[in-house]
Amino acid sequence: MRMIERIGEWFDHRLQIAAPIRDAAEHPVPRNTASWWYVFGSAALVVFLLQLATGILLALIYVPSADQAWNSLQALNHDVALGWFIRALHGWGSNFMVAIVLIHMMQVFLFGAYKFPRELTWIVGVFLLLMTLGMAFTGQVLRFDQDAYWGLGIGASIASRVPVIGAAVVKLMLGGPIIAGATLSRFFALHVFVVPGSLIAFVCLHLLMVLKLGINEWPMPGRIVKRATYESEYHELTKNDGAPFVPYAIWKDMFFAAFILIAVAACAVYFGPFGPTGRPDPTIIQTVPKPDYFFLWLYAVLSLLPPSLETPVLLVGPVIVIVGLLLLPFLSGEGEKSWKRRPIAVLTVLLIAIALGTFTHLAEHAPWSPHMNAWSSEPVPDRMLRSTTALERQGALVFQVKQCRNCHALGEAGGERGPALDRVAVRLTQDQLIRQVIQGGGNMPAYGKNLSPAETTALVAFLGTLHPAGQAPARDDSRETVLGDGADKRPGVQP
Amino acid sequence: MSNETMLTRRGLFMKIGILFNGLVGTALAVPIVQYLFSSVTRGFGNGYLSWVPLGRVNEFPEGETRLATFRNPYVTPTDGKTADTACWVRRVAGNEFQVFAVNCAHLGCPVRWFPQSGLFMCPCHGGAYYRDGSRASGPPERGLFEYPYRVEDGRIVIHAGELPTPGPSAALSTRKPPCA
């Protein structure tokens, strides 16, 4: 033991860091901050360290070349011992990191921790969030598969909308005229050098400020932050009701961090690594690209926005959000910290959480995407063909062959882009059906040029049978008035 | 002259040192910026575009739309399959063609052609286009991107080389090609 002590002393005589480390570890924190609510920041740091370690391990095998990246991922998954597990740890670690950083940010916001004098800590934190999302996106690109390839295309399409310099931004982003070798190389440089380097520097700044300014005290309703008095009040608090961070508070951080690591490892073992999906070959177009889960909400927003709003929302929206987050500590740098007295803050968090959750949930089902194979894989339900005429059956065939099923469900099978047609005859008269099929409208393409009159007649005859047994189809009175009682209900058939 | 404003010998050297480093830094920054933006500057004046053969005209039946592939004219050694590009070739009649990029004009996902219903459909956000490439429904603000083409010695060649994107200047022409 004496020996170890002497070696330690030899090093510290030269490094001179034992005292500052002891000071940092034992700095007093308000007793009530030793709470399970205060563990997310350290958990984010631990997951980041996991990402650094697993990232370096992956880089031992991964080849950042458009030609070979996909093959090297296959090798990691199948040939290298436990390569799949390291990939899974890194993939699940990234999901956990995004989630924990968001939870940490929400907690900090609700606890008023961004207020004086911790404005800069918050601002650095906002950049840390952006870098974390940047790591998530660039990481998805390095998993160079079909999703990555077409995801880059979506990124380029968004970048191209920047006025004046859009085309230049696209070429800068892609490193050339198309998504190819240079694109992957630069995203590798971003993911492995540029963003992690900045992340490490910003994490150090963030931590330094937490140590220098002290952890945010547990907010008490009615304890108002004022620039003139806050710092002396905080000093009083830590002096009178403080405890050393180590060991008083740190054990909760350690327990939670270990729990998170176990959770990441459990997900990695149980669910395995993410992809890669198909080979990134742009000539294989039978693909349905989807972003990773943290960008699913954006995928939904892009589908649901009216076309005219898309470019403004894509270009101006992020600027407003980021500037808003950066300005927050200056707009409300003083005043009440407790969420119990900040209803608008609580509602804002709830609104954002519900909106993101709803969009993510929608994107998992993607009702706006046509089901590309529904027309050839989902037969018309038997009950809809029972006791139908030859013409109506011909119409059912037209319905399948013309891919109507890709957007319209029958018997709960088929696309959801357009309304389900199980009861369409109740909603639309024959004339309205003909008009809708031929002219389209309301987001439906016009089929006038792609259907012969005979096909239209058959199709509408079939659609006219789609109504519940006890409910009559919609009728157009004027038609019967003009054509008389003998008017045949089927379109195109003269009385 | 007071002591505070007096320029000492060492103070002067330090200032010259800062100036010297500033000059060297600026001189180094020029090639670095040129290198960094080389992918942009190379594209000036259609630097990436050239005429690429797609195949013989009679490989494309009249009235039909077929998928064709070509090797991008600008290739780097590590591109592999990513430099192969697909496009939809519609032979209207005779030597009259329309060559569409597979990239949806909304956000670039690959559209698929359904000959039975005469529609291009996008799997991502549900954009749809008619057989002539015009917008049918969904979020796209415009029709499919069209490559300019010409017919030479019984072969169809297109002017290609850049990823078509919906941005104002990156967008390929939707006008009728000059030799149509």
Image: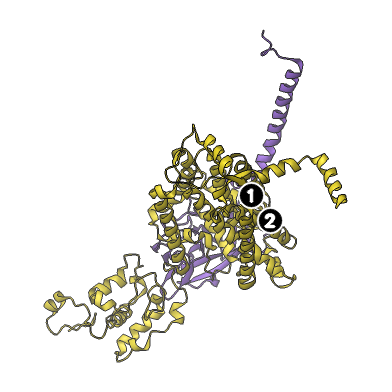
Chain colours: A yellow, B purple
In the image, A306: left or right of A119? left
The chain holding disc 1 is: A
Q: Position of residue A92 (x, y in %)?
A: 61, 64
The chain holding disc 2 is: A
Q: Is residue B79 above or below residue A449?
A: above
**Residue A187 visible in the current orientation:** no
The residue lying at 72 percent from left, 29 percent from top is B21
Q: Is residue A69 above or below residue A175?
A: below
Using the rendered view, name the quadrant where residue A438 is placed.
Answer: bottom left
Q: Secondary structure at mark 2?
A: helix
Q: Amino acid at mark 1?
A: Val
Viewer-side residue, A135 vs A152:
A135
The residue lying at 68 percent from left, 36 percent from top is B29
Which one is closest to the eye, mark 1 or mark 2?
Answer: 2
Q: Amino acid at mark 2?
A: Leu
Residue pointed to by mark 2: A52
Q: Position of residue A433 (x, y in %)?
A: 27, 74
Q: Position of residue A118 (x, y in %)?
A: 54, 40
Residue pointed to by mark 1: A195
The disc placed on residue A324 is: none
In the image, A134: left or right of A360? right
